[in-house]
Amino acid sequence: MYARFVAQPFAGEANLHDFIARIVEDHSLRSLTVVVAWAKRSGLRHLRRPLDDFRGRGGESRMIVGIDEGGATRQGLETACGLFDQIHVFHDRSGRTFHPKIYLAQGEANAELLIGSNNLTAGGVFFNYEASLSCVLDLTSTEDVDLLDAVLGYIDRLYADDGACIELDNDTLERLVRDARYKIGDEDAIRRPQRLDDPENFDSDVDFTDASQTSQGLSASPSIFAGSRERKRGAPSQREETSSAARAGRSTVEADTPPQAVRPAAGARIVKRWFKQMTATDAQRPPQRGSKPSNPTGDLRLVQARHPIDQTTYSVRISLSLSIGSPDQVQGAL
């Protein structure tokens, strides 16, 4: 088993969107099971393309989603019905909150598992501070099979609890929405209109407050918190997602994921690490212009590449230990 810690939402780290997109690209994985407390359109719409691709290549998908604590929305449940082959809603009348977050993709010889704090909301997919463990399971390993069996056993017990776990169809959805006790929300009523070229970033210099706090004047006092110093990853705009998906042969999700760090030479002290997705020019394969090919420059341009540096004044002597897996990817240590 290979395990990796997923630290969201920091720049240079993976997020839930990366995990979903990666398992969709692995054609050895044939089934996807998601068990989450909440699912909203705000998060699911960013996963529409990879989930549609997964089903389009014959993959089967199912979901169990909760509706507790006012976390469910009509739009989220409707969107989920269109993206998964089978969807069930779980609610325990005793008052126990349904709160798991499990993402499991299975093939004949391997499986991928992510368990953590991420719901299928915009926050859970991109923005919120989330922590999870992503595991690649080798199903020829007894220990890995035992772990998979334990996870599947938990999921099977949820499905078998047919009083609390019911299949979602149009009639069930309407009954849930009409019944005030379930607090099914409306995303259209609480979100501002958004253009296709608007990125969904929650970077703001003010604290979020609800209407009752604002009316009482509680939000007028200065916040005891200063702004976060960490750079964050955000979600692309819908226009960017569409444009990126149209580029043949280019992944839309791994550009922000750092390559595996190169081991420094003995005794070396690394002050900062830097990495970037190489352009054709950086890779010494400049594009041909007309009938005359461009000459390689011999340069690797130092740009921000989403790192917190001022590339106009940052002076370094670059010594690269390179590992090139394809013409446009490089990793190294400065």
Image (cartoon, rainbow, N blue to C red):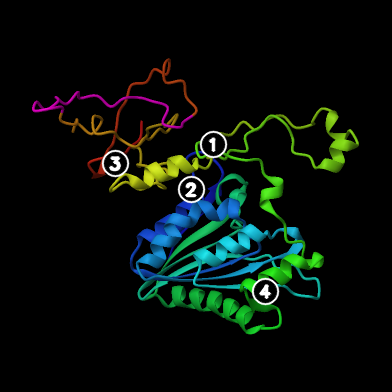
What's under tag 4, amino acid-wise? Thr
- Residue at image point 56% right, 61% down: 79
Among numbered discs 1 and 3, the one appearing first in the sequence: 1
Task: Name the element at disc 2.
Answer: loop
How crowded is the residue under tag 4: few (<14 C-alpha within 10 Å), some, or many (20+)? few
Quadrant where the N terminus is found in the figure: bottom left
Where does residue 87 sit, x and y in percent of width and height?
A: 57, 72
Which numbered dot is residue 9? none
Give the residue pinned by disc 3: 329
Task: Name the element at disc 3.
Answer: strand
Q: Are marks 1 and 3 in contact (CB under 8 Å)?
A: no
- Specify the segment rendered in magenta: 289-307
Toward the left, the furthest residue is: 291
- For marks 1 and 3, give the CA distance: 29 Å
Task: Name the element at disc 4.
Answer: helix
Among numbered discs 3 and 2, the one appearing first in the sequence: 2
How crowded is the residue under tag 3: few (<14 C-alpha within 10 Å), some, or many (20+)? some
Which numbered dot is residue 14? 2
Whether residue 205 is situated above or below residue 245 in the rendered picture = above
Quadrant where the C terminus is found in the figure: top left
